[in-house]
Amino acid sequence: MQVTMTVNDVEVTREIEARLLLVHFLRDVLGLTGTHWGCDTSNCGTCVVWLDGEPVKSCTVLAAMAGGHQVRTVEGLAKGAELDPIQQGFMQCHGLQCGFCTPGMMMTARALLDRNPDPSETEIREAISGQICRCTGYATIVRSVRWAAVAEAQAAAQVTETTESSEAGEIDNAGQPAEAVA
Amino acid sequence: MTTVHERVDTFHDNDQKPVGYGRMLRKEDPRFLRGRGRYVDDVQLPGMLHLAILRSPVAHARIVSIDTSAAEASPGVKAVVTGAMLAQQNLAWMPTLSNDVQAVLATDKVRFQGQEVAFVVAEDRYAARDALELIDVEYDVLDPVIDARRALESDAPLIRDDLDGKTNNHCFDWETGDEAATEAVFARADVVVSQDLVYPRVHPAPMETCGAVADYDAVDGKLRLWSTTQAPHAHRTLYAIVAGLPEHKIQVISPDIGGGFGNKVPIYPGYVCAIVASIVTGKPVKWMEDRSENLISTGFARDYIMRGEIAATRDGRILGIRTNVLADHGAFNGTAAPVKYPAGFFGVFTGSYDIEAAYCKMTAVYTNKAPGGVAYACSFRITEAVYLVERIVDCLADELGMDPAELRLKNFIQPEQFPYTTKTGWVYDSGNYEPTMRLAMEMAGYDELRREQAEKRARDELMGIGIAFFTEAVGAGPRKDMDILGLGMADGCELRVHPTGKAVVRLSVQSQGQGHETTFAQIVAEEIGIPPSDIEVLHGDTDNTPFGLGTYGSRSTPVSGAAAALVARKVRDKARIIASGMLEVSVADLEWEKGAFHVAGDPGRSVTIQDIALRAHGAGDLPEGIEGGLEAQICYNPSNLTYPHGAYICVVDIDPGTAQVTVRRFIAVDDCGTRINPMIIEGQVHGGLTDGVGMALMEMIAFDEDGNCLGASLMDYLIPTSLEVPDWETGFTVTPSPHHPIGAKGVGESATVGSPPAIVNAVVDALKPFGVRHADMPLTPSRVWDAMRGQARPPI
Ligand code: FES
Ligand code: FES
């Protein structure tokens, strides 16, 4: 069958088997290998991507079901050369070791901050609780997400300050578009 | 972007070294953050085929027949291979790392559920899996041996009838220490306490399962093998031996690895099948196991049934420790340990205490379970040893009515006794235990916790405080004593400084997340004054790195890290001679500081390492007898193991209504000698502590009486998530290793070794009001519930 979807803002159309999983479509057909696969039972979360902005386990979604929808993967997280604050937070706080769970963790964390810009430690732990990291012990992942939350709050505060003083605040000092931190 | 640190650790690092050590962000992170890591399953080659393995559904059966005709006719299938076909090429069996043999594909019998029986090669993953369903195997099911305690009974079914003359399921016997001397101290001791303990079978379960891509080029006879291996060089040599391929025509590439924890040390049949498939089909072949396959067939860990005994004086002086162990090795002895150490380093079971005598007797048996034994960050069985000693020391404290911290403090080996030879012959290099213990107690607020516990007990609330103090033995090892299948456990390192003063360092070890690209750049930077950002670290490719035995047993920093420091010093020695020519003074008149040599007493006259690198490659004169270039290679053979130590304190609360254990706090003070990158060290500790929570409270590979694996998925084999673990509290002391060139000891497995007894001790402490003295892992709610009712039972 033929499927058309938008992956990281690019429309793609491919001929696929109806039973093809989204994770295999992304990895094997599109070559987007940043999304990983780690279990047979929807438990590990290394495969998390966004479907219309919501984190989903792509091992549990058929590629055909994503037809006509927007998919975003870890490859679509950074804005060009500029890493997303979540990515920066993971680097700053040692939120990754082997890196295998990391793409899925970051996609969930980004979605969390988009709906809750100031999550508590408990809220972060709950958000990532459907995903397993075998390396980090989670504390540094929690800190990474908090780092991004604080960084974004500070960037937003700077934007407000600049707007108030000069009325010209489309882009903050760190080069973040204002809407990215709204 | 502004740098924000919301959470500041209480205990700061004080490493103030200029270029080398310190909290440096990881050089490898950018590729992982962008989804550009390169794991084995990411490798896509033109024309690549996919391999899937048919596994035994039963634990013990004779293979009557295999019909592959329907599978061969399935769409997209290129080949179907059985054990009988491999046997024609003499490839049906392969050696294990413990001088046993293991079936690549079963020929005569299957010996555990999940054993490899046949494989299919097809055009894609799905077609290969489809065809597996069409292979028809007829099994004549035999009684299995599941309970290790019954493996040696006279009527037990014989598992290894493939071994000549084998008439029972005995694998090996091993003993250490002095039986008579130990008997004597036990005979005169005021107090003797004994306790049966089970360390259940667990599994490392790295998030990336095992797999390989084999690409055999028939024209030039070269095999390229991308594989999930922690030991690429050792694997290359073993493939040369198993498959009869010339070693110089084998390239093992171990790219980014999604966690190892010992699971990726052995050679698995799947790797060999992929190689065979590529040779047979003339195409690249990928094999990636699924999670069930990983859990049921690859290297398990532990599975020790132990009796621990401890003898002491009434006032709490420990005199002797004795243990009897029954070790379940599964169907093949696939233990990955130095050959002279069939029980790994279990011999350090005397722990951190100065005692008079010790003795261990061990019997290992075959059962109808998956092979393995040494895995899951165990430092070659030190997990089991530390669990044994730290659990029975707590039992002794209970018997004596002494505080467990006080009992430990009273019996520590004292700083002036190092190097200390234990009663089982291990030479601990250095240690200073009391400050480590005291720091952990101070961080925990130990006395305050005990007060809180007393108050809670008065209100019938269940709170427990558990302590574990461990000494590890890592960095295997001196080649005269330690080898794996004849390969000495030394490691090579090569350093090249380029003309512009940038450098490349090539390692024989391989990272599975430990951050080698950062740590090793820091080690070299510290020695040679080139910033870490200017040093490229290469690893995980046998064609491009020197020989060495790989990353496991916390050996990278102790062995390969020593090699990196020494090779940098060798380059610096050459740089000094070149500098003496450039500055026209004798080498003795040169002083080294921060990446430059200057004339003693005249700091203005100096040349930097970058100046020297350019001269070494340039047209100018070099001192008499000095070759051009600035590079060196060495092979480091450690003179001893290194012995990190640590003090862990765990605080748990137990819900009396549900028996659910919550780890409220965990304080870990580690002493791993000189600290290279404290951020990475903390990360290693955090990960290990989480493993400890998993083993103590959740994880177990269980079997039913027919040998069906009950932990065959992540729904059944429970791994801690973010909700089961607390925010870790870490601290450190520094007691450098006297024999390691930079004093580093290694830390990768310390927390996995040290944390399970701390957690179990805490749970047992919480259950004291119920008269509980011991309860075995995993301390799941139902098992804790039973313990509260006086019905604690072993898990197997
Ligand atoms: S691969 Fe494990 S949840 Fe999707
Ligand atoms: S970093 Fe390895 S699994 Fe999370």
Image (cartoon, coloured by chain):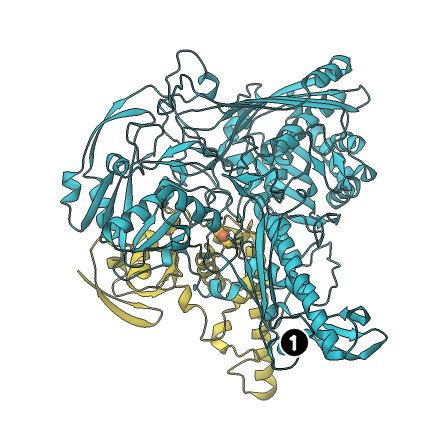
Chain colours: A yellow, B cyan
Q: Is residue B460 visible from the viewing direction of this image? A: no
Q: Say left or right for B789 vs B287.
A: right
Q: In front: B131, or B605?
A: B605
In percent of width and height, residue B785 lies at: 54, 26
Pointer 1 indicates a residue of which chain?
A: B
Q: Say left or right for B613 vs A14.
A: right
Residue B385 found in image quarter: top right
Q: In front: A112, or B348?
A: B348
Q: Is residue B785 visible from the viewing direction of this image? A: yes
Residue B574 found in image quarter: bottom right
Instruction: Classify B620 as above or below A30.
Output: below
Mark 1 is surrounded, within 10 Å at the Cα level, by few (under 14), some (14 to 19) or many (20 or more) other residues, namely: many
The residue most toward the right is: B601
Residue at image position (68%, 35%) is B468
Find out if the beta carbon at label 1 lies less than 8 Å from the nearest ligand 2 atom: no
Q: In front: A32, or B693?
A: A32
> Which element type, helix, strand or loop, lies under badge 1?
helix
Residue at image position (65%, 53%) is B562
In percent of width and height, residue A75 lies at: 41, 67
Say which quadrant the N terminus of chain B sits in. Answer: bottom right
Q: In front: B493, or B415?
A: B493
Instruction: Classify A76 as above or below B382.
Output: below
In percent of width and height, residue A32 lies at: 35, 63
Q: Say left or right for B124 vs B484.
A: left
Q: Disc 1 marks which residue?
A: B610
In percent of width and height, residue B43 lies at: 36, 59
What amino acid is labelled 1 in the image? Gln
Q: How many marks?
A: 1
